[in-house]
Image (spheres, helix red, strand yellow):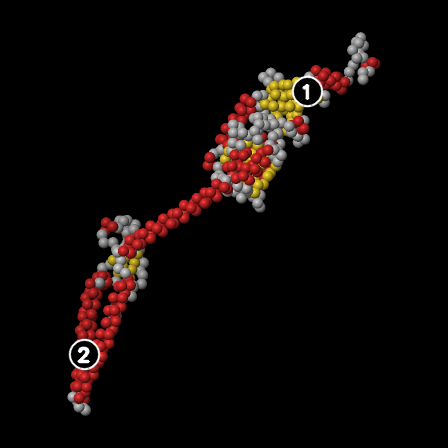
């Protein structure tokens, strides 16, 4: 309320407080701009912990603050980002605490499909540059999964179509992870479902299906969000994306291991037709049995052909058996005859023998053996003496040719540090350490160009070699 006493002198305009003026401006703005639609580019977008969205809406000349309350933000079909051109519908009001006017947005949508497509293409290129869409990252799908995880809305027709198609083709155990498939919360729920299935340790699915029915680009925008694409690319479980109709394309299609044109087609890709498998198995069984019969017939014919060229082994055995019987009879007769002849010769020889007849030959044989033994002993002793003499002569000759005999006559052997003999003066360098071997020991020396004699160090003489006694 204004105070008349505070009216300036000479003026009919009452004085207003700041709150009164701010309230009047607020009412004026809301009455005149109660429902407006503004086109502009998002700038400085941020999400508060309360769920409210704050941003600036600008063009090439002006900027107006904007706000989306939490309940309206939950109904958005896409995730706002800086630089995105949008159409905002709401009311203009003011914020008296800061003397600023702003638009309270009740509905926000991209400014035409072109803006979303440009954003989509920009995001696709960025993610592709990271290798998230590379073909080598894609995993093969299991031929017949035991469990299939489905990520979709629990109330839509999509889950019913998938279950119906799986029941028709090959019934499998299905695990449903219910999520929102549209709106701002959809992207986070889908990404969390993919990560949740991968984190399971018991009853983990062998295959995942992310599915949603058709819709506009705004309706499907959750499946273009970066959080969903990264979750699909990081999934260890093979994943089929079935978002929208055949003409709809989202970024999750590029990151998934297989894209299905529809959710029903995803079920068809996931499992084979059991009836077709049964027919195929029966056909394989029939073909295997026919092949076995043909193989047996071919081998039987081949065996019969080979048998015609072979003599009956029973006949061969019969002939050999008969010959064996003949040889057995002949052997028995020969043994009896030989024994009889031996007995006759023994009897005849025994009749000519007299007592004492063998004593003299035995004595003569013993004498001859003793004489031969004595002769052999003398020959061995003479042979040993001759061998010892030749060995002694050879040892003396070897000692005469030994280099130690040369050393004993006053010579020396010159060696290098490694012990190799040096036989020429050209092989010796100035300052080289030499080893000199004499008859009575060894000494070290240093080669020089002249002057005093090098230092010598005697070492004990090696023990003289001694020829051992061979015997």
Residue 187 sits in which quadrant?
Answer: top right
Quadrant housing the N terminus: top right
Query: Left or right of 351: which side holds 461?
Result: right
Query: Left or right of 161: which side holds 298?
Result: left
Query: Is 16 located above or below residue 152 in the figure?
Result: above
Q: Which of marks 2 and 1 is nearer the N terminus?
A: 1
Tell whether label 1 touches label 2 (CB within 8 Å): no
Task: Return the residue nearer the eye: 280 or 343.
Answer: 280
Res. 376 mark = 2
Secondary element at tag 2: helix
Residue 355 sits in which quadrant?
Answer: bottom left
Residue at horizontal 20 percent and vertical 74 percent from the top: 384
Residue at horizontal 78 percent and vertical 11 percent from the top: 13
> Looking at the image, can residue 447 be seen?
yes
Mark 2–mark 1 Cα distance, whole angstroms, equals 144 Å
User: Which numbered disc, 2 or 1, marks the residue closer to the eye?
Assistant: 1
Residue at horizontal 56 percent and vertical 22 percent from the top: 113
Residue at horizontal 81 percent and vertical 14 percent from the top: 6
Query: Left or right of 413: which side holds 96?
Result: right
Q: Where is residue 298 in the image (x, y as percent from the top left)?
A: 33, 50
Q: Position of residue 28 (x, y in %)?
A: 72, 16
Residue 191 sits in which quadrant?
Answer: top right
**Which residue corresponds to mark 1?**
91
Secondary element at tag 1: strand
Q: Please rate how many residues cluster around mark 1, counting C-alpha atoms within 10 Å: few if below 14, some from 14 to 19, many from 20.
A: many
Question: Hey, which residue is sitting farthest right in the picture?
Answer: 5
Task: Return the residue nearer the eye: 42 or 270.
Answer: 270
Question: Hey, which residue is sitting farthest top in the picture?
Answer: 10
> Looking at the image, can residue 191 be seen?
no
- Figure disc tally: 2
């Amino acid at each position: 309320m204004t105070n008349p006493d505070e009216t300036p002198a000479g003026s009919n305009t009452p004085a207003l407080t700041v709150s009164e003026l701010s309230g009047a401006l607020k009412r004026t703005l809301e009455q005149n701009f109660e429902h407006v639609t503004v086109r502009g580019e998002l700038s400085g977008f941020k999400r508060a912990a309360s769920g409210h969205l704050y941003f600036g809406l600008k063009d090439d000349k002006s900027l107006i603050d904007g706000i989306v309350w939490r309940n309206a933000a939950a109904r958005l079909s896409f995730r706002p980002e800086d630089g995105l051109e949008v159409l905002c519908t709401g009311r203009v009001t003011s914020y008296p605490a800061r003397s600023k006017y702003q638009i309270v947005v009740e509905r926000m949508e991209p400014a035409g499909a072109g803006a979303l497509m440009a954003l989509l293409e920009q995001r696709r290129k960025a993610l592709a540059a990271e290798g998230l869409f590379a073909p080598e990252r894609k995993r093969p799908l299991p031929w017949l999964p035991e469990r299939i995880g489905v990520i979709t809305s629990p109330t839509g027709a999509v889950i019913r179509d998938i279950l119906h198609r799986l029941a028709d083709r090959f019934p499998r155990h299905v695990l449903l992870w219910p999520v929102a498939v549209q709106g701002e919360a959809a992207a986070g729920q889908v990404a969390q479902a993919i990560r949740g299935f991968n984190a399971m340790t018991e009853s983990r699915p062998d295959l995942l299906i992310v599915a949603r029915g058709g819709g506009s680009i705004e309706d499907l925008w959750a499946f273009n969000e970066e959080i969903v694409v990264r979750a699909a690319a990081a999934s260890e479980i093979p994943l089929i994306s079935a978002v929208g109709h055949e003409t709809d394309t989202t970024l999750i299609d590029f990151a998934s291991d297989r894209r299905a044109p529809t959710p029903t087609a995803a079920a068809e890709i996931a499992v084979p037709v059991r009836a077709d498998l049964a027919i195929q198995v029966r056909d394989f069984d029939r073909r295997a049995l026919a092949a076995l019969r043909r193989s047996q017939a071919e081998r039987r014919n081949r065996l019969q052909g080979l048998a015609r060229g072979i003599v009956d082994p029973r006949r061969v055995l019969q002939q050999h058996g008969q010959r064996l019987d003949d040889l057995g009879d002949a052997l028995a007769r020969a043994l009896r005859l030989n024994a009889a002849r031996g007995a006759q010769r023994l009897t005849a020889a025994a009749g000519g023998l007299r007592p004492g007849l063998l004593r003299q030959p035995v004595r003569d044989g013993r004498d001859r053996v003793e004489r031969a033994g004595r002769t052999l002993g003398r020959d061995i002793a003479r042979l040993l003496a001759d061998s010892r003499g030749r060995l002694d002569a050879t040892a003396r000759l070897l000692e005469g040719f030994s280099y130690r005999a040369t050393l004993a006559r006053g010579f020396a052997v010159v060696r290098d540090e490694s012990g190799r003999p040096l036989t020429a003066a050209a092989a010796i360098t100035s300052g080289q350490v030499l080893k000199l071997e004499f008859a009575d020991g060894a000494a070290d020396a240093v080669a020089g160009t002249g002057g005093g004699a090098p230092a010598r160090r005697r070492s004990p003489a090696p023990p003289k070699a001694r020829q051992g006694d061979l015997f």
